[in-house]
Image (cartoon, rainbow, N blue to C red):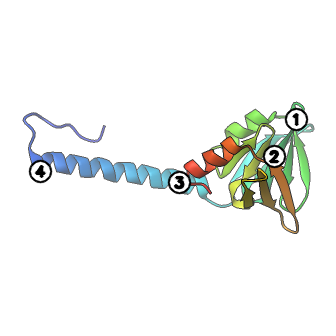
Amino acid sequence: VFDFIVMPLEEDKLRNAIEKAVFHINKYIHIKLSQKFKNNVKIRVNTTNGYRLVNLDSLSYCIADGSYTKICFSNGKTEFSSYYLGKIEKTLIDYHFVRISRSVIVNLKKIKKIDRQKEICVIELDHDFHEFKITKMNIRKLEAEHIL
């Protein structure tokens, strides 16, 4: 609630209340987006021996491996997490990551190309590229959300 408006409505008071609401909503959206896309965000990911703090900018993709998840970094290194992919997705969804198939989550910043005809998503690593199958539904979803 941003303001109360008493009846009968006065045009100036209504206009001011709307402007105040729009200002607060825009401020909230700006804060959320800046938190969502700020650099050097780290998340905690459980591993078999403890946990690791993962810098999201260095994370390229995560791929399901049974009830574990293989976390792959831009430099080619990998780490296994004792979390299943769905649990990692819940953490990453608030940042610049999207699930492109049943078993793969990718960093949106690392997507190099989407081939609609071949249904392939190409991820850019530091010195290489990696291809994943992407469903047509997920391609449409990314396009509808203006992510691609």
Q: Is residue 75 above or below residue 141?
A: below
Residue holding disc 2? 62
Classify mark 1: residues with Cα within 10 Å, few (<14), some (14-19) or many (20+).
Answer: some
Helix, strand or loop at label 1? It is: strand
Q: Assign the N terminus to one quadrant of the image.
A: top left
- Pinpoint residue 67: horizontal percent, then vertical percent: 87, 30
Question: In whole angstroms, how far apart are the C-alphas of marks 1 and 3?
Answer: 30 Å
Classify mark 3: residues with Cα within 10 Å, few (<14), some (14-19) or many (20+).
Answer: few
Helix, strand or loop at label 2? It is: strand
Mark 1 and mark 4 residues within 8 Å of each other at the beta carbon = no
Classify mark 4: residues with Cα within 10 Å, few (<14), some (14-19) or many (20+).
Answer: few
Q: Is residue 127 above or below residue 53?
A: below
Q: Which mark is residue 12?
A: 4
Res. 41 in view: yes
Pick whichever of labels 1 and 3 is earlier in the sequence.
Answer: 3
- Pinpoint residue 17: horizontal percent, then vertical percent: 22, 46
Judge by depth and name the residue closer to the eye, 75 or 43. Answer: 75
Pick whichever of labels 2 and 1 is earlier in the sequence.
Answer: 2
Say what amino acid the circle numbered 4 marks.
Answer: Asp
Kindly report which numbered mark, 2 or 3, lies closer to the viewer in this rendering. Answer: 2
Question: In whole angstroms, how far apart are the C-alphas of marks 3 and 4?
Answer: 31 Å
Helix, strand or loop at label 3? It is: helix
Question: In whole angstroms, how far apart are the C-alphas of marks 2 and 1?
Answer: 10 Å
Q: Which mark is residue 33?
A: 3
Question: In whole angstroms, how far apart are the C-alphas of marks 1 and 4?
Answer: 59 Å
Residue holding disc 1? 68
